[in-house]
Image (cartoon, helix red, strand yellow):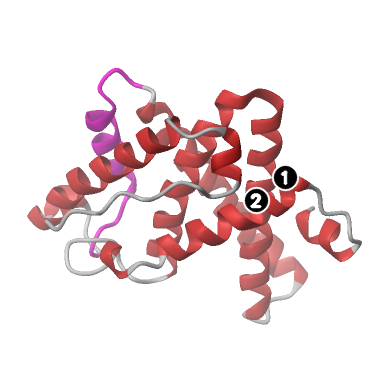
Amino acid sequence: MGFLNRLFGRDGAAEKDARRIYAKLMAQSRDPQFYGDGRFVDNYDGRIDVLTLHIAAILSNLNRYGENGERLGQALFDEMKDDFEIALREEALSDASVKKRIQPMISLFYDRVKKYAEALNQDAPKEALAAVFAETLSVGGTAPEFKPSATAFVDTISSYLLDFDMALSEASLGEIALTEFSFPVLPAN
C-alpha cells in the first residue's frame, strides 16, 4: 500500500515518518557489530533478523500511543513489506514468485515481532528475550545452545534489545517519528 500511495502522490505524515524510521533501522541493522563469529550470520536471513528485532522494539513502543501509534506502526510495516518486495523483484522474480516468497517472510516477521514484544513486556524481560533468541536465532550458522560464543551473544543481544526498548520508552511519539532516538552500543562478547 505504501508503494501505491507514493506512486499516486498520497503520502501522509505517517508514511513519511515510517520511511525515515525504516531508513534509520535499516542502516543500524547493517552495522558490522552485529555480524561475525558467534554473532549473526552476515547473509540475507541474518540481516532480516537484526532488522526485525529493531522494528519489534519500535512497534512495541508505538502501541502506547493509541491510534496515532497504530497508524505509524502500520506505515512502518508497509514500508518494510514494500522494501522486501522490491528486493525480491530485483532478483528478477515474477509476481507469482514474489507473492509466494513474501508470505513466509511476513509470517516469520509477525511471529518474531510477537515473541519479542511479549518478552519485552515480561516481569523478567532479559531472561524472556534470551529464551526467545535461543529458540529463534541461528547465530553463526549454529543453534545458540550448541556453540558457547553464540550463547554469550544471545545474552549480549538480549541486553542490547532491552536497552533499545528502554530508550524508546522514554521517547515521545514525535521523537520516535522524527528518529530522535539513539541505539545502544552492542558490547563485545
Q: Which element carries disc 2, helix, strand or loop? A: helix
Q: Residue, x 56% and y 24% (percent of image)?
A: 64
Q: In the displayed structure, does residue 170 sit left or right of residue 62? A: left
Distance from disc 1 to disc 2, alpha carbons, whole Å, reads 6 Å
Residue 18 - label: 2
Q: Residue, x 36% and y 33% (percent of image)?
A: 166
Q: Is residue 75 above or below residue 169?
A: below
Residue 76 - label: none
Other residues around mark 2 within 10 Å, as few (<14) / some (14–19) / many (≥20): many
Give x and y (percent) for residue 66. 65, 23
Residue 14 - label: 1
First to last magenta residue range: 122-140
Which amino acid lies under the numbered mark 2 shown in the image of this protein? Ala
Q: Nearer the viewer, residue 24 or 143?
A: 24
Q: Are marks 1 and 2 in contact (CB under 8 Å)?
A: yes
Which amino acid lies under the numbered mark 1 shown in the image of this protein? Ala
